[in-house]
Image: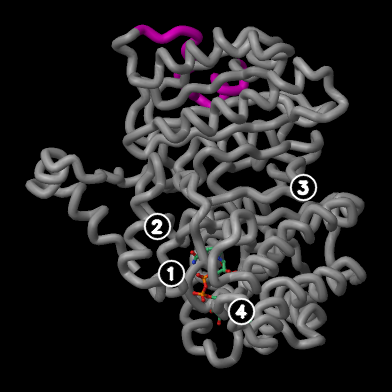
Amino acid sequence: MTDSYLTLVNSGLSKNIAKKLGLPRPAILRRYHPGQPLVPGPVLLIGSSAGTEALATELLAWGLDVRRHAGPKDKLGAIVAVLDEVSDPEDLAEPMLTVGASLRSLLPGGRVVTISRLASAAEAPARAAARQGIQGALRSLAHELRGGATGNGILLDDGVDAKAPSALAALRFFLSGRSAYVDGQFLLVGSPEGQLPADFDQPLAGQVAVVTGAARGIGAAIAKVLHRDGARVICVDVPAAGEQLAKVSNETGGTALQLDITGEAAGQKILEHAHSRYGRLDIVVHNAGITRDKLLANMDEAKWNSVINVNIASQLRINEVLLASELFPQAPRVVSLASTSGIAGNRGQTNYAASKAGVIGMVAASAGAFAERGGSINAVAPGFIETEMTARIPMATREIARRMLPSLQQGGLPLDVAETISFLVSDAAGGINGQTLRVCGQSLVGA
Ligand code: NAD
């Protein structure tokens, strides 16, 4: 599942030919490696609120080169705009135009991150307009970025300030290579919960995680990344995938559990396995999923039901068992796989989109129950990810899906989804609950 065009336009002679012909030239994205610098250059911090000053201290403590002004010749690794006190759409001009004046200085793989407040219906109309306006501006400027740079935003809820643990964790995530394929997105920090790790390269140290559908594709990548980040991983998949499952669990030093998640006792079996092997279970990633595509006019009951059963009904059953069990810990973390098809819809995928939109509804409605246990549940909605699932899409459609992304012009990797999940299941993200984060390179097409 490789994108040969991406490799071609980034090598030697063909790079120049593509340039001369005006062909799309997707960049090789900046991806995370433990120990690498957080950003590829200095960080320009824009804003004048108390939150901006507090953040400057924090960024300096991370060892970043923080600038409050940038000259035309400065090269920047990131631009962070703190807009938490805007109260009128007219307040946006100065900070947004300052961001704009520095965009040409952004290095390849650079980042633009806004930090602002959630616009609620209870707000004065002008304040709500200003806050909502930031979302339109950021999503648009993200379309204008080149060289694998991305733009994302952090939304602070009432009672949460820019230095809240999950606001800082979200900022680190967006600045880092972990968010390579997250573009044009906003993440709501809803509470001051969450705890930053002692070691940012081992955020899951000591934790035990279950990943369903771990034998291949995105699930295998999740298992590997959670392991890299310090977790012990239980890899779950159907018995038919046993051989591949064993390979992944060997690679991650974890254990394999052959299990069909649609079985009535699946939740109990997961808990029992975790407790007998590790004496605990902290993290569950509901990744297993299937497609059975047909136009609705040709859809039969079996296709409809199997997709709903694997993709959402089984997750609901497992969560119910987990929440009812005393074996599930304080501060449990769950992430579930949605899809951009569940947001935008996709021809031929009414069953799949119903299941994935269902996941988005499920995490929002389960957030309260998880918060009562000091935990969280969120969803990740991938767009076009290079896996066996998307390799089955006809070549022309696949090529269009890759290149039509306005800025990144390529599909994502299973690794990109895995990095986002590893962030959301970390204690540092504890103030983020009931949310769905898209990993889609700002596209709305996908499996
Ligand atoms: P994949 O088909 O490559 O892998 C899915 C895995 O789930 C397989 O190993 C399969 O055996 C397992 N599985 C299926 N039914 C199961 C069951 N009943 N019990 C246990 N395991 C079961 O899929 P993928 O592309 O890696 O996708 C992983 C997840 O991401 C899915 O939920 C999918 O809907 C979602 N997703 C994928 C994309 C994409 O572009 N590939 C986009 C959006 C969302």
Q: Residues within 10 Å of mark 4 (few under 14, many from 20)?
A: few
The magenta region covers 57-71
Does residue 348 lie above or below 231 as drawn? below
The image position of residue 202, as x and y in percent, is 57, 49
Q: Residues within 10 Å of mark 1 (few under 14, many from 20)?
A: some
SS state under label 1: helix
Residue matched to label 4? 297
Looking at this rendering, what residue extends furthest in the bottom direction?
240
Residue pictured at 36% horizontal, 7% vertical = 71
Q: Which mark is nearer the camera, 4 or 2? A: 4
Instruction: Give the quadrant of residue 391.
Output: bottom left
SS state under label 2: helix
SS state under label 4: helix
* First along the sequence among labels 1 and 2: 1
Inter-mark Cα distance, 1 to 4: 23 Å
> Is residue 178 visible to us here?
no
Report the amino acid beneath label 2: Ala
* First along the sequence among labels 1 and 4: 4
SS state under label 3: loop
Report the amino acid beneath label 3: Asn
Residue at mark 1: C-beta within 8 A of ligand 1: yes
Q: Which mark is nearer the camera, 1 or 4? A: 4
Inter-mark Cα distance, 4 to 3: 37 Å
Residue matched to label 3? 433
Report the amino acid beneath label 1: Thr
Q: Are marks 3 and 2 in contact (CB under 8 Å)?
A: no
- Viewer-nearest residue: 311 or 177: 311
Report ligand 1 position as a quadrant: bottom right
Residue pictured at 65% horizontal, 78% vertical = 307
Residue 390 circle label: 1
